[in-house]
Image (cartoon, helix red, strand yellow):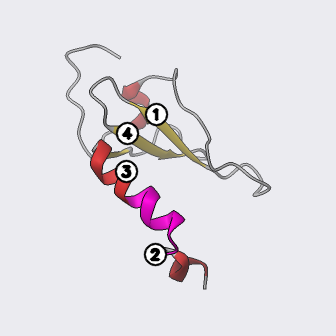
Amino acid sequence: MDRRTRIYNGMPAKDLGTEGWQRPWSGGNGGSCVEAMKLGDGRVALRQSTDPEGPALIYTHHEMATFIRGAKGGEADFLLA
């Protein structure tokens, strides 16, 4: 990724490059996973593994930390019901 690339929510994930994407939530779901990349400024990009060139959602470190803590604490369990 070029340092001059403007990073914004909904940008094509391919513009962030192909290196650094990880599948922290991968499982037995047939290859459809959320992939995450930590950006140089501390933000986190998320994309759908089945659409690697599609839109990337960009979150601040604080937003991601708050979400993870909430999910661990059961606040996202309604998504599974």
First along the sequence among labels 4 and 2:
4
Secondary structure beneath disc 2?
loop
Q: Residues within 10 Å of mark 2 (few under 14, many from 20)?
A: few
Q: Which mark is residue 44?
A: 4
Q: CA distance from mark 3 to mark 2?
A: 14 Å
Q: Amino acid at mark 1?
A: Met
Query: Does the residue at mark 3 contact the one at mark 4 (Cβ under 8 Å)?
Result: yes
Q: Name the residue: 44% across, 60% down.
A: 69
What segment is highlighted magenta in the picture? Answer: 67-74
Q: Give the residue number, with chain letter if any, for mark 1.
A: 37
Query: Does the residue at mark 4 contact the one at mark 2 (Cβ under 8 Å)?
Result: no
Most extreme residue toward the bottom, as rendered? 81
Residue 57 visible, this angle: yes
First along the sequence among labels 4 and 1:
1
> Which quadrant holds residue 42?
top left
Q: CA distance from mark 4 to mark 1?
A: 6 Å
Report the label total.
4
First along the sequence among labels 3 and 4:
4
